[in-house]
Amino acid sequence: MLGDSNKMKTLTKMRTDAQLLFSAGLRAVDPEIAVKKYCRIDGNRLRVGSGEFELDSFGKIHVIGCGKATAPMAQAIETLLEDRITNGVLNVKYGHLAHLERISIIEAGHPVPDQNGEEGARRIMELAMSSGPNDLVLCLISGGGSALLPLPAPQLILADKQETIRVLIACGATIHEINAIRKHTSAIKGGRLAQAVYPASLVTLILSDVVGDDLDVIASGPCVPDSSTFQDCIGILNKYDIRSNLPDAIVRHLQAGAAGKISETPKHDDPAFSRGTQLVIGSNSDAIKAAGTEASRRGYCPLILSSMFEGDTDEVSRVHGAIVREVLKSGNPVLPPACILSGGETTVVLHGTGRGGRNQQFALTLAPLIAGQRSVVALSAGTDGTDGPTDAAGAIIDNTTITKAEAIGLDYRNYLDNNDAYNFFSRTGELLITGPTKTNVMDLRVLLIA
């Protein structure tokens, strides 16, 4: 009995540690702090990274943007520029708000875009087009920006794009693939917002939620050249065999573009990018490194696997499970007490009708792989506080999760088969619910081994 009591105390402490490491990662990518880290006022100059802008030389300063974290980013910009800001418009996810004096906020739908998002995108586009050659436009971009900036291309309507996103998510397409199609069915993404701003000066501050921090993929790259093509989009339709599932108008539009009947998205030689500056001010790597530093402080040996995990969630989970078992068996590739850290953004292929998200799916796939081992705790969560269409950020499990589930009559296999991790973990009490974190740099996974 004493041994069991000690084991439970160890697991309880490790669960607390895992959540503290996750919190340390979030602090490292706080949007307001990130803006102030890279931007400062020096007299009449705005310094952005290594660049500088003479504020007195601009007639107007506009602030535009989209994403879950852009409200606190805008707060930092208002603190820096104060009444130098002429006006601004942001599209944010419902509930992801901040108090702003000079910049308007429009709440909109995510991950499926809605009418509010379309209206906000139209206002952003109008403000961009109103800027002149002596104006400065600051564009704030963060994760979620793709869904929050829906402005359909001519001949398309919002319902077409909504259904297309549902199909792409369900088939397991990667974020790079989803955003390639978003860009080629949009009037604002894929560099078209930069075209609207030109010839004004454009500074884009970016909080990355994309594997590899590819600028033309984050929020579907509204302010940077697009490397994808209409032909790439046709290849995605063929890869997942989803033509028959998509709206006819979307398929016709992509086919027309591939045939050269619709203009491609702007590329690197477009003059619209000649007056633009882009800077990534926070990423998944920053969150992972901060979690690793906190792990060391708490007595764990940290091992960062990668910030670039993508692909099938179940496969990625099984890889992590194999590493945990190797650590326990041989002490490789890191000796216990160990902290294994990883990030990125995986995808879930839907087979059932349950509730959940990729982080909850990861945790439920991992739970039986660590069952019965020595003390192991695993946390997998979205840094934005949202995992799929649920109110949970993810889940936190340990080596006793499956035993506890069986004791209350739960068979994890049934929940996995139905993509119903949310209801499984709501029964075991292992959902991680943080509420909106007002940041977004993909997912963070923390695995602790005693």
Image (spheres, helix red, strand yellow):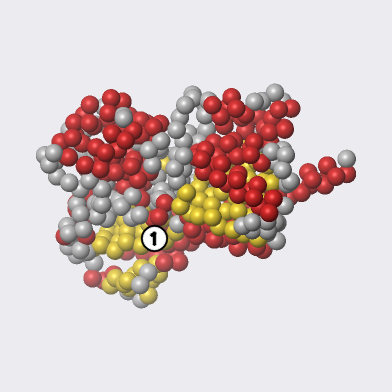
* Number of numbered labels in the structure image: 1
* Vertical comparison of 427 with 67: above or below: above
Residue of label 1 = 280
Label 1: state its secondary structure: strand
In the rendered image, residue 313, in percent from the top left (x then y), is placed at: 50, 40
Residue 144 position within the rendered picture, expressed as x and y whole percent measured from the top left: 40, 45
Image side of residue 129 versus residue 350, left or right: left
Local packing at callout 1 (Cα closer than 10 Å; few below 14, some 14-19, many 20+) is some
Tell me the amino acid under the disc marked 1. Val
- Which of the pair 188/286 is nearer the observer? 286
What residue do we see at 32% from left, 71% from top?
51
Residue at x 82%, y 47% (from the top left corner): 6
Q: Which quarter of the figure is the N terminus placed in?
A: top right
**Vertical placement of residue 183 versus 131, above or below:** above
| Residue closest to the far left | 261
Check the image and name the residue furthest to the front.
330
Q: Which residue is the extreme one toward the right?
A: 2
Quadrant of res 135: bottom left
Which residue is rendered at x = 40% and y = 69% of the image? Answer: 40
Q: Position of residue 426 (x, y in %)?
A: 62, 31
Look at 39% across and 32% down and name the residue there: 171
